[in-house]
Image (spheres, grey):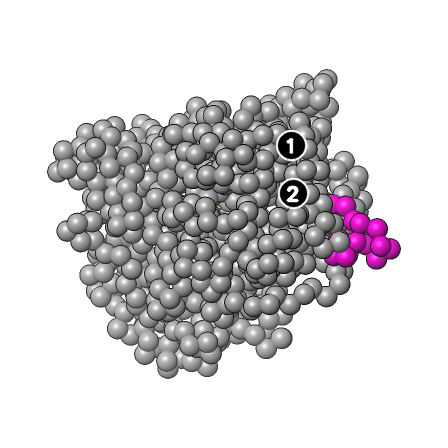
Amino acid sequence: MAGESRRDFLKTAATAGVVGFLGGEFFLNALKPLEARPPTPALEKYYTSCGVCHSNCGIRVYVKDGVIRFLDGNPEDLHSGGKVCAKGVAGSYLPYAPDRLKYPLKRTNPEKGIEVDPGWVTISWEEALDTTAKRLGEIKEKYGPQSIIFIAHPTGFSERLRKALGSPNRITHHDTCIITHVVVEKFTIGTKLWMYDFPNSKYILCFGWDQPSKGKVPLTRRFSEAKRRGAKIVVVNPLVTLMSSQADEWISIIPGTDLAFALAMINVIISEDLYDKEYVRKYTNFEEHEEEIRNWVKDYTPEWASTITGVPAETIRRIAKEFATTKPSVIPMHKRDPPGPNYANSWKLCHAIIILNALVGSIDNVGGWLFTKGVSIPSLDKVYPPPPYPKPPVSEDICGRSRLPLLDKVKLGIFSTLANNILAKKPYEVKAAIIYKYNLLAFPNPKRLVEALKQLEFIVTIDVLPSESVQLADIVLPDCTYLEREGFSVRIYNGWYPQVSVFQPVIKTMYDCRSADWIFCELGKRLAPDYFKKPDGAFFTPSEYVREALVKGIGITFEELAQRGIWSKPERFKPFAKLESMVKAGKKIQIYGETFKKYGYDPLPSWQPRRDNPSPEYPLYLLITRPPVHRHGKTTDNPYLLELYPENVAVIHPETAEKLGIKDLDLVWVESRTGRVRVKAKLFEGIRKDCVCIPHGFGHWSRGLIYGYGRGVNDGDLIPDQTIEEIIDRGDPTGGACMCDVCVKVYKG
Ligand SMILES: Nc1nc2c(c(=O)[nH]1)N[C@H]1C(S)=C(S)[C@@H](COP(=O)(O)OP(=O)(O)OC[C@H]3O[C@@H](n4cnc5c(=O)[nH]c(N)nc54)[C@H](O)[C@@H]3O)O[C@H]1N2
Ligand SMILES: Nc1nc2c(c(=O)[nH]1)N[C@H]1C(S)=C(S)[C@@H](COP(=O)(O)OP(=O)(O)OC[C@H]3O[C@@H](n4cnc5c(=O)[nH]c(N)nc54)[C@H](O)[C@@H]3O)O[C@H]1N2
Ligand code: SF4
Ligand SMILES: [Mo]
């Protein structure tokens, strides 16, 4: 689709709701300023934060007779500006979900697996905690602490328990979420950057960056402001998304080839002398390595990139020039965009985008990519220093992180290797797992992980819903929802100045649920009591920690914060302030990756193809995205959100469908080398003819989820898990999971 007709299509797509499967109406509304509904005065009002996604937007919850009636945004919140998205509003359903976990449970059926009834019986907290501690204690004694793995979203409390037990094994979801960004940004800029000065940007170029389509308030509203103020928006994406429908230009690209596009842009900007010389000299190591840089990029011409990306050379050349000359310009990155852990070359794309942003002087600059002004609230270990932790008896972890030195330094990832290593008992046997706030469906090839976890002697799961992770447990411990617990959140996405938002119980905890922090403390008391004490010898509680940390960190009591919801320390943004302090400390942005070189990796991102390529058997590229009104699998059991978006579909181009004899909403099989899923086809002109896209978050097989069970499919069933050797052979220092680097076939079924 070229020029005028493409623009017309985008306009029609947005207005006529052709992109309905992506939640078009919701998106268009998000671009308009929302008016908060005036609350009824008789209601009690409590400030807290939304816990549906990591943005933790400040909210006001209105309660009557102990029941939540309504919620809206806290206008004081720098993050959200007082807005709440559909997911945030529908979150008030969670405490009352009829299928919520209500009491501790014990499994009576020793057989485990998909569709196997665990035979739950309700037990007391005492029995649940004692049994869990006894089983973990026995396993630690018999097989060593490394045989206990934490599949957990890490918190100070879960980490205290893991370290006190002496297990090196913490499996987090970062491998498929942000790991390439974290590692590459850490070793080139010094830290992962999260925020953008979109309202002052004049040119925003997005390589698959699609946050506004997610309705993530802090990013969507800033982007909307840029749009209102007339920034030119260019979207490179194999799929027309809701954000593309708002763009000035949509460029369709072969998936997994953006690296070639970015390299060619660098080529044009350097060879045509379009870069910001003063910025580059002052704040980057360009000059020290100029010759190598020029040599590295000289052959990556737009003509070369055109053969790889399918984008005309003149388009790439024009975009490079526009990006370098329409200032301020920026290329945003976030999490699961193509520079995220999606392709074999994603880590190099991430580096190339950092180089592009540095060449135009966008990092730490007006209209650009900014360092968050955070605030340091002391961690649990700072508030209640533990005795020295035992050294794990083995230094190697079960996933192979310790074999990737740069990944090991940031202490995150890997989880795509877990199933393989458990099954192969490599480098040792795993016997028990503590699963916290983590769904098995978030793993690539989760069926294989189920096979692996079935072999364990003991699993305890801490969750709020009867998720898939619960179905494999021996003991289930019901957590509080975010509307029932205490805590705080430090702003990152719009961290213009230090800001902290409160979490406080707005209703009494329902049923017999207890907070996860409390659960970890109780397990700690039983398993490693010395690590769960204050200096005076008494056991600490999560509440005490929150209170002490706030006073020590920002000099405010919990009660004061709870009254206002938000604590801020306004400061004006000073461009280059952080870069200046880096220069003073002898550090610069590593356009030339000196650290990568030191550890044996490519110092400059040379071209590397994707892992999986179309073949006669699997001719289509798989794309994944997320709907605006769901947050992964955790909201696809929420009836209000399901009303807006009831199931996922396989999106394919009408011409591709016609060749395959597929009509709109026909049931089809989408099959990869790893597995196949049966799902409705949705014909959509806005996807490349060689692609199929499945939005993530559906395909629950836990019968406990009364609304989520059996809806749609899990894209993860198509994605292979990996071995650590494959990752090492690919030369990826970040251990990325290659979530989209998969080819599939589609046929009627
Ligand atoms: N509503 C909602 N919001 C969320 C979440 C959610 O589940 N729902 N999850 C949160 C979390 S944890 C995450 S990680 C983020 C994820 O949010 P994003 O990082 O925005 O990731 P995706 O939604 O997967 O969108 C990725 C986009 O990249 C495009 N793409 C895929 N391959 C290529 C390629 O090779 N080249 C180019 N140029 N584009 C490509 C896809 O078509 C898609 O539009 O969102 C966060 N916000
Ligand atoms: N196939 C595939 N896999 C993916 C992705 C993909 O696009 N495709 N995306 C990846 C990305 S970017 C991410 S961030 C991850 C997300 O992975 P997860 O964070 O695991 O995502 P969810 O599916 O939302 O599952 C959250 C789990 O926590 C539980 N839960 C929710 N709230 C609470 C709570 O307050 N307390 C406790 N104890 N439990 C709670 C839910 O019931 C559920 O079991 O998935 C990754 N995996
Ligand atoms: S973006 Fe939406 S879901 Fe995420 S914290 Fe804000 S209101 Fe909640
Ligand atoms: Mo994520």
Q: Is residue 442 magenta?
A: no
Left/right placement of residue 576 relative to residue 484 reads left
Residue shown at 34% from the left, 61% from the top: 344
Which quarter of the figure is the C terminus placed in?
top left
Residue shown at 30% from the left, 66% from the top: 608
Residue 135 or residue 311, whichever sits in front: 135
Residue 573 or residue 513, whichever sits in front: 513
Residue 249 or residue 478, whichever sits in front: 478
Q: Which residues are magenta?
A: 530-542
Classed neighbour count for the residue bearing mark 1: other residues with Cα under 10 Å, few (<14), some (14–19), many (≥20)? some
**Magenta stretch: dominant secondary structure:** loop
- Where residue 360 appears, as percent x and y from the top left, is 44, 64
Residue 234 or residue 180, whichever sits in front: 180
Q: Which mark is residue 123?
A: 1
The kind of residue on which mark 1 rests is Ile
In contact (CB < 8 Å): disc 1 and disc 2: yes
Classed neighbour count for the residue bearing mark 2: other residues with Cα under 10 Å, few (<14), some (14–19), many (≥20)? some
Q: Is residue 540 magenta?
A: yes
